[in-house]
Image (tube, rainbow, N blue to C red):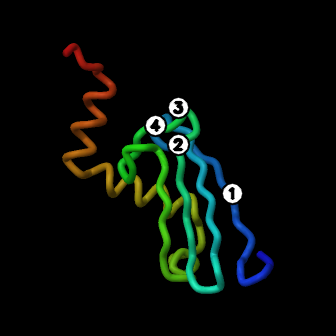
Amino acid sequence: MSLRGGEMEEQRYRFTWRGIEIEAVYTPLKWNVIAHLEIRSIRPARAPLPITSSGYRSHFHQPVTIEALGGDVIAQTIAWLDDEATRPEWQTQDTASRQGELF
C-alpha cells in the first residue's frame, strides 16, 4: 500500500459466496480520515446479499479496523455476510428466490 494524496491505494478482491461472485474494494485510508469498503455482486449482477438488497454496499469505518482483525478482507467480508445471513429476513428472501414465486 502506498500513500497517495491522503489515500492508501485501493485493494480489489474477488471471491464467491454461496454461488454469488462478489467484488470487494477496500481503501484502508480515504481522504486521510476513514477506511472504505465497497461490496458488489458481480455474477449474477446486482444479486441481493444479506447486507444489501441492491447488490451494492458502501461501508465507511474507522481506519485499521480490518487490519486489527487480521487484515484478511475476504475472510472478514464472508464473516459479515454469514452473520447477516442468519437474520430471518434474509433467510425468507433467500428461500423465496431459490424456490421462485408463483404469484
In the image, residue 81 lies at what x, y percent?
40, 53
- Residue 9 quadrant: bottom right
In the image, residue 95 lies at what x, y percent?
26, 31
SS at circle 3: loop
3D distance between C-alphas at marks 3 and 1: 18 Å
Give the mark, 3 or 1, whose residue is nearer the N terminus.
1
SS at circle 2: strand
Q: Residue at x 48, y 76 (%)?
A: 61
> What number of labels is visible?
4
Which residue bears the numbered disc 2?
41
Question: What label does residue 12 carry, if any?
Answer: 1
Q: Nearer the viewer, residue 102 or 85?
A: 102
Question: What label does residue 47 carry, if any?
Answer: 4
Q: Quadrant of the N terminus?
A: bottom right
**In the picture provided, is 7 more to the left or to the right than 68?**
right
Evaluate if marks 3 and 1 touch, with contact meaning CB atoms under 8 Å apart.
no
Mark 2 crowd level (few <14, some 14–19, many ≥20, 10 Å Cα): many
Give the mark, 4 or 2, whose residue is nearer the N terminus.
2
Evaluate if marks 4 and 2 touch, with contact meaning CB atoms under 8 Å apart.
yes
Residue type at mark 1 is Arg
Which residue bears the numbered disc 3?
44
- Residue positioned most to the top: 102
